Amino acid sequence: MPISDAIQTRLAIPSDMARIVLVVNAAFAIETFIEGQRITHKEISEMAKKGEFLIAEDAAGRIVASVYLELRGQTGYFGMLAVDPAQQGTGIGRAMVNAAENYFARRGCNRVDITVLSLRPELPPFYRKLGYRQTGVQEFRPSRPLKRGFECHCIVMSKPL
């Protein structure tokens, strides 16, 4: 699926996982409230057993974005949307959300759920512009500990398809 003439999307294959780890960790480096890197190769591989990753590649075959996709009955869930920092602000994130929604619609889902961290206040407005609305909160269970002095919860947002 083309995002632009130079950017194409496809579902990831096992040999993409190491490159996805690099993009995710670069994109999530802003989350300085978590100890260590955001994700490991082992964690990405475990996630890929429950769902799939959609990736965007540039003309040279470099992964410039990724998003995790999981079917939960008639609800789709996407998370860990990551855009290479050098490509942020170019519309790739929005295009990846659209691609994720299309993925779920083709599989018969009637809703998409996401969770965003309360310590990332810039994210809810971004998703609201795309039609998502807050539908709840959840406890944040990070794979790495939060740094001392930080408290965080997950904001659940949903959009009907």
Image: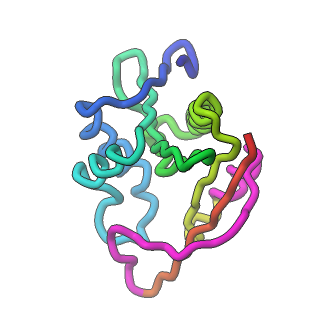
Q: Is residue 94 left or right of residue 79?
A: right
Coloring basis for residues? rainbow
In the picture shown, does residue 19 fall above or below 26? above
Measured as percent of width and height from the top left, residue 78 is found at 54, 47
| Residue 11 sits in quarter | top left
| Residue 116 sits in quarter | bottom right
Q: Residue at x 48, y 82 (%)?
A: 150
In the picture shown, does residue 45 fall above or below 91? below
Measured as percent of width and height from the top left, residue 103 is found at 57, 31
Q: Is residue 158 left or right of residue 24?
A: right
Q: Residue at x 57, y 22 (%)?
A: 3
Q: Residue at x 31, y 60 (%)?
A: 37
Location of the C terminus by quadrant is top right
Answer whether residue 91 is visible to the viewer in this image: no
The magenta stretch is 123-148
**Between residues 65 and 72, which one lies in front from this camera angle?**
72
| Residue 12 sits in quarter | top left
- Decide whether residue 126 is among the magenta residues: yes
Q: Residue at x 73, y 62 (%)?
A: 134
Measured as percent of width and height from the top left, residue 88 is found at 53, 40
Q: Residue furthest top?
A: 5
